[in-house]
Image (cartoon, rainbow, N blue to C red):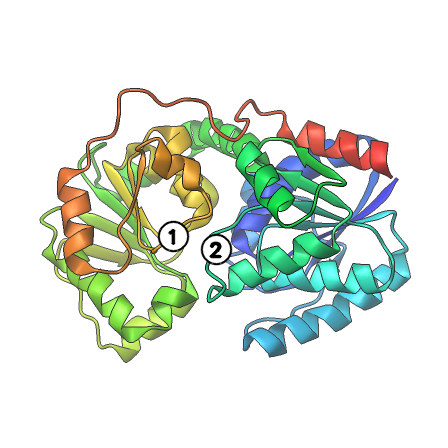
Amino acid sequence: MKIVSIVGARPQFIKAAAVSRVLRQRHTEVLVHTGQHYDDNMSAVFFDELGIPTPEIHLGVGSGSHGEQTGAMLAGIERALLAEQPDWALVYGDTNSTLAGALAAAKLHIPVAHIEAGLRSFNRAMPEEVNRVLTDHVSTLLLCPSQTAVENLAKEGLQSGVHSVGDVMADAQLFAARQARAHSDMLMSLGLTSNKFLLATVHRAENTDNPERLRAILAAFDALAERIVFPVHPRTRSMLARLDYAPLAHVQLMEPLGYLDMVQLEQAARLILTDSGGIQKEAYWLGTPCVTLRDETEWVETVALGWNILAGAQTERILHAVRTFTPPSSRPDLYGGDGQAAERCVALLKKEG
């Protein structure tokens, strides 16, 4: 069986690391990197740390508007698929790379398998939500991380080829947590003490491209009387410059980190403030309280179980959440965090292929 796997952004590298380790034991994989994330801190370091094979095809698309970026990817992925003639095109998550891969394959009548199918925030203003919905509706194999995702698809009339497999990011996170304990010295290098700092990430367009929302989030960071470690996404950094943001002494801006260093900080933080979907899940698995800087989330189970609070981009809501958050004593297993999701995905690709 021959698979073309399409990745382009940081969360996809993490998921692909888990699946590729299993896939390449028994099958042929051609990895296509769109170049959506092209900075070394956003791309190359992940391949190195997680043992992801060097991409056989690198499109080098880079940044651009949604239409420009997706169109360039669509053309490049189509050429790759025509050259490789795979049994499956495998896409991950909800980025422009995901949608471009799914559309290119569907138009060539190559079956599409979507890992993280069925997730919904129910906010069509989010480009990621549009990408999720469209990708699911052209996919042949819908590999869902949870029963909630399966139910979301059923409500849209999608039941054929739908499977709950657990979350491949849990597989990657289990691997990375072991590696981080052995190889990351981030706490020591930053002079941090476990449970004595907050970790923040902001990168979603709904926050970075809206000056009012971004200012409100930054105002909350400045008003908190705790040390905040804030690795800054390149897009976010350009927006901070436009806003002339000068952080107070307790807010430490830094370059994006590799995955192992991020996992170590996530493990050690008292609390995480983020608009990242992946980090919301990782926080849950690691037992770190999470305040989500969005008005809704596709990971609704983390909120329902009391480990994640939706604070949006309102300064006072963020401050109240950070100051009063007390997580529950129990933390049930979520998203099939048994480390076997990648095995289940590959088995279904073989069975359905």
Q: Identify the image quadrant of the C terminus.
A: top right
- Per the image, the residue denoted by label 2 is 122
The residue at the point 14 percent across, 53 percent down is 250
Q: How many marks?
A: 2
Residue 174 is tagged as none
Where is residue 304 drawn, in percent x and y? 36, 35
- Per the image, the residue denoted by label 1 is 296
Residue closer to the observer: 264 or 106: 106
Tell whether label 2 touches label 1 (CB within 8 Å): yes
Q: Identify the image quadrant of the N terminus.
A: top right
Mark 1 lies on a secondary structure that is loop
Residue type for callout 2: Phe
> How far separated are the C-alphas under marks 1 and 2?
8 Å
Residue closer to the observer: 169 or 128: 128
Q: Please say whether residue 239 is visible from this viewpoint.
A: yes
Where is residue 82 drawn, in percent x and y? 89, 63
Residue type for callout 1: Glu
